[in-house]
Image (cartoon, grey):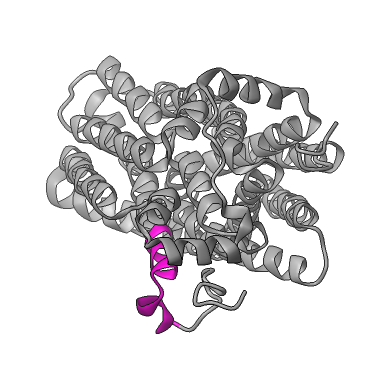
Amino acid sequence: MNNKYAQAELGSTPTEAVSSNPYKKYQVITVSLLLVIGIINYVDRSALSIANTSIQRDMGITPSEMGILLSAFSLAYALAQLPLGVIIDRLGSKISLGAALLGWSVAQTASGLINSFSAFIGLRIVLGIGEAPMFPSAAKALSEWFDAEKRGTPTGIVLSSTCIGPCIAPPLLTLLMITWGWRGMFIVTGVFGIVLAACWFAFYKSKERYLAELPAQERERLLASQPQSVATPKPTIKEQLSAWAELFRHKTTWGAVLGFMGVIYMLWLHLTWLPGYFEREHGLTLYQTAWVVSLAYVFGALGTIVAGRICDRLVKNGVSILGSRKIVVVCALLSAAAFTVPLSFGSGIVLSVMLLCCALFSVNMASSTAWMIVNTVVDNRRVASFGSIQNFGGYLAGSVAPIVTGFSIQQTGSFASAFLISAVVASVAAMAYVLLLKQPISTDQ
């Protein structure tokens, strides 16, 4: 590589090079937009859990009904994954993610206007379907713009949105709720998402479109330095469906699906019930809870970024790309389980916060690494398909977590059994990665 694009990966050139290197500029634009969209994705899905107590009181909803309402999103999110993967691979990230963002933001806005439990369930289902393309689309965009050995860091940055969103959600949404009520909170966040969708359509550019707009000489020079970026003929719909179905024949696919089920089970338990845990078990006020939960998610955000850096460093030191991902995801899941078990036996507020911070750091390391696995084990044309299959399995488990937790609290009066179950699920998921995730699908015969 001896041209101005030779080091066009995120973090490989000085900051000032961004303005003079258009390839680098669009890499930064891609990561930045995906990060912000990921944040609003999680802010929107966090809104119901933040307003949990207020909505139960205002609408007369029981804890078990709230568990069902919380799970309506994740079940719809999971079921939407399978068809959406093929659609994203067919249409590309720009159209798929832009339309999805617009759709879920409209549903979020409408959630502030309804008056019945059944209507709320319907809008949560629409929200789940709308948010479903987010991370498969992000994985596809990152696989286009970054070489496999350098995707760890940008993937970690984008996946940090899964913690930054829940981190800023409690104080931000609490402030909105105190100012305008829980209905106003839904409306404001929904309108922001609509504006963000317009920004995505205006500023994001796929790598294929970027290359097509380059002068011929510069395009040839860039393709010469990155031969793996050469465009391949677009497959037919029949070929895409066949390639999608073929993924289910491989142990690697099932390892990723079963492993991610444990990741999302634990993540979704924390996302939906953590505020209620601190209010119920430790008697914190709504405002105190908001700040404690935010602190836990700061550690989660650090975990996603640390995971990317560790994976890239392992690859640099000679570990295979898939091997680096496997080491990190297994260790992270086992650590998350280890930090969660003590919560089942009861602890003071300080120790509980420390354990939950460590657990969220670990499980978010696992989540970020799981998405690095997606764009490691398949070629670019099947990244969204594989990612959506993984997400399908994960959010099937995620849809169970709030219901199991809600009924557990109703029956036992505490969170002890819910935390213990999540630790067991995470440990089993780690074993799935160990036993089934062996090699990339392109060579997994």
Q: In this view, does 429 lie above or below 203?
A: above
Residue 222 appears in the figure: yes
| Quadrant of res 443 | top right
Residue at the image point whose x is 62% and y is 28% from the top: 393
Magenta run includes residue 24: yes
- Main SS of the magenta part reads helix
Residue extending farthest to the top is: 118
- Is 29 covered by the magenta stretch? yes
Q: Which of 362 and 227 is in front in this view?
A: 227
241 and 321: which is toward the camera: 241
**Residue at left offset 68%, top offset 66%:** 312
Residue 411: quarter of image: top right
55 or 361: nearer the viewer = 361
- From what the image shows, is residue 414 above or below residue 325? above
Would you say 96 lies left or right of 323 here? left
Measuring from the top left, give residue 47's x and y in whole percent.
Answer: 32, 42
Please tell me which residue is depicted at 57% across the width and 53% down the height of the picture. Answer: 229
Can the viewer see residue 353 in this picture? no
Q: What stretch is highlighted in magenta?
A: 15-30
